[in-house]
Image (tube, coloured by chain):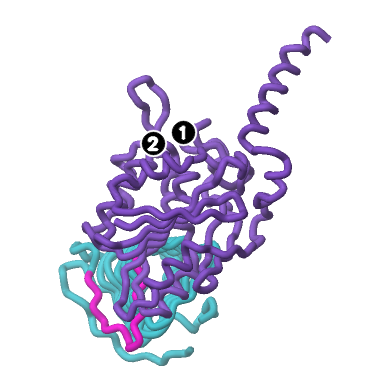
Chain colours: A cyan, B purple
Amino acid sequence: MDTPKTGEFAHIGKSVVIKGELSGSEDLYVDGTVEGSIELQGNNLVIGPNGHVRANVNAKGVVVQGKLDGNIRASERTELRKTAVAVGEIITQRVAIEDGAYFKGKVDIQKEAAKPNPQPLRSEPKVEAKSAATGAAAATSGTSVSGAGGAGPVTPSPSVIKN
Amino acid sequence: MLDRAPEVAMASVTHSFMKLFRGSSADSDRGVKPAHPGQRLTRRSSGLAELSRALKSEEPLCILDLGYTSAANIRYLTERGHKIYSEDLLEASTDPSLITQDEQGKPILDSRRFLADNLVYQAAHFDIVLCWNLADYLDESLVKPVVGRLWSTIKPGGMLLAFFHTREAGPDAPCYRYHIVNNDMLEMQHIEARRDVRRGPTGALHTAIEKSFRLQRVFNNRHIENLFRDFASIKFFLTRDNIREVLVVR
């Protein structure tokens, strides 16, 4: 899973801060800040070099280039790139860690696909998009953010997965 | 000329001290030469060979790797069905917020705070701990508290593998990270510290060579036995590269 090209992934820009439950049915690239939980069952998550995620993550594949403080449950593959700083538990089928990556936590390789079981780190869901000036689309089609008023997670509409 | 005499005398004393620390030049020649960052050397490990018998267990083991994050170790151990925990204590010890002062106002690291943030596991959790060369490079104020915490997190009968330099290794012995290659072979890679630790968190106490860590002290056999006095047994493996491998059993 390489760094996504524009348009292939829903994109959260580096000036965007999201607090709450983030779920979707398309691949997601996070270069901003997310606190809470990320649920992308069957899809991929890339945390970009500027990304700072304090959340439990459930996805098909996870690539970390920035900072992740939380547990990863990836049904297929987890990659920690050389700039990654990851703290938490990784439950996955395959793991790749580049030289230079920092990891503190537990690695549990499971032969079968890891079952989804994300627990939000914080119970104060709210959306706080500080700025969208950098072209960040916090919630594009197929990716939803729950929060403000405790509406709970919104079931995303299916979208075309271009990967 | 007379003005330079004390300088020359001091240089001579320093040279003698360093010679004492390093041993004879013949011994130094046998030692591990400082490596370039990224360069990898291999060495046979009798301690790992002994540990490998336990790694063949059908039951999944809980293993704690206290070295720099190693993809090779994670792959090697998870391929055998074990659960691995990774925690780089040497890197964690360079956190500047740990610096405090003792009663004499001397800078030390706050071991309580360090143990509140690191090595936080339930009692008797691990079957094996890979300590590598941590004790030789860790700040003095943290060594005993860390070993005490490790004792409590290891299961009775669980094992800990540690490496200690001999005096002949010299004060500029490079700090390596260790990658498991097979049952008894390790690959050593020179560590580059992530933070700037040239002065170290406590200044002179933790100076570093270039961008790496500096050997803090040399334990002799009695020191090592005292360090692990609460453990049930201790086994030494002597090697040719001025390293003593130690396998202790709780």
Front residue of A136 and B147: B147
- Location of residue B20 in the rendering, given as x and y in whole percent from the top left corner: 63, 32
Q: Nearer the viewer, mark 2 or mark 1?
A: 2
Query: Which residue lies most toward the right here?
Result: B1
Q: Secondary structure at mark 2?
A: helix
Q: Is residue A114 magenta?
A: yes
Furthest residue toward top: B2
Near-viewer residue (B207 or A84):
B207
Q: Is residue B134 visible?
A: yes
Q: Determine whether A15 is above or below B221 in the image.
A: below
| Mark 2 or mark 1, earlier in chain | 2
Q: Is residue A57 above or below residue B41?
A: below
- Percent coordinates x, y for residue A81 in the rendering: 51, 69
What residue does disc 2 label?
A: B141
What residue sits 47% from the left and 37% below the top? B201
Dot 2: chain letter: B
Residue A122 higher or lower than B75, as above or below: above
Query: Which amino acid, by three-letter code, is at mark 1?
Result: Thr
User: Residue B99 placed where, x, y %?
Assistant: 40, 34
Q: Is residue A50 visible?
A: no
For disc 1, the marked residue is B202
Task: Give coordinates of residue B132: x percent, y percent.
Answer: 47, 56
Magenta-colored stretch includes residue B12 = no
Image marks 2 and 1: residues in contact by CB distance under 8 Å: yes
The subunit letter for the residue under badge 1 reads: B
* Three-letter code for the amino acid on which mark 2 is drawn: Ser
What is the chief secondary structure element of the magenta stretch?
loop
First to last magenta residue range: A104-119
